[in-house]
Amino acid sequence: MDPLSPLPSFLEMKMIEEAATAAGRGMKLAIEHVIQRASLIQSPSWRSRVARFVENILKRHGSEIRLLITYAVNRQCLRSNACAPLAESMYGGRRAKLGPAGDNGQYSVLPLNDTDKI
């Protein structure tokens, strides 16, 4: 491992992948917990109607809701000073681009700026 390299090592990439997987599992468990809690409300009131509505929406569209939440969080992190998705920024990773280093045809790693497309 080269500590001066801007590229992450294999171990860092594996840790980033594990963080992203754990975050996905955590969000899935949270949605399942909300569905379970909503199904327990049985009193004939507006709360039970709202709980059944939320339960039905989450059962039908839970994976899409998780995807939208993940997209929103990662987009916000990419556009922040971190310049990396949430899992990468947890371990100090940053997105970068290759740019010309000079007239000799070599390239260097440059940080992203506001004009770069995400």
Image (spheres, helix red, strand yellow):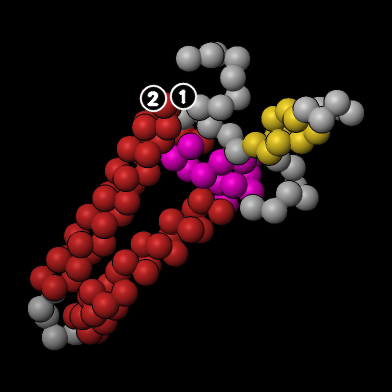
Q: CA distance from mark 1 to mark 2?
A: 5 Å
Which stretch is magenta? Answer: 76-88
- Coordinates of residue 106 in the picture (x, y in percent): 78, 27
Residue 11 position by quadrant: top left
Q: Residue at x 56, y 54 (%)?
A: 75
Q: Residue at x 32, y 66 (%)?
A: 63
Is residue 86 within the magenta segment? yes
Residue 85 vs 34, above or below: the answer is above
- What kind of element bears circle 1? loop
Most extreme residue toward the front, as rendered?
104
Amino acid type at mark 2: Leu
Q: Residue at x 60, y 38 (%)?
A: 95
Say few, some or many: other residues with alpha carbon within 10 Å of mark 1 (under 14 / 14 to 19 / 20 or more): few
What residue did someone put label 2 on? 11
Residue 115 vs 47, above or below: the answer is above
Amino acid type at mark 1: Ser
What residue did someone put label 1 on? 9
- Coordinates of residue 26 in the picture (x, y in percent): 27, 49
- Coordinates of residue 13 in the picture (x, y in percent): 42, 32
- Coordinates of residue 101 in the picture (x, y in percent): 81, 27
Residue 26 in sight from this viewpoint:
yes
Is residue 117 within the magenta segment? no
Residue 46 position by quadrant: bottom left
How many dots with numbers? Answer: 2
Residues under numbered marks 1 and 2 in contact, where contact means CB atoms less than 8 Å apart = yes
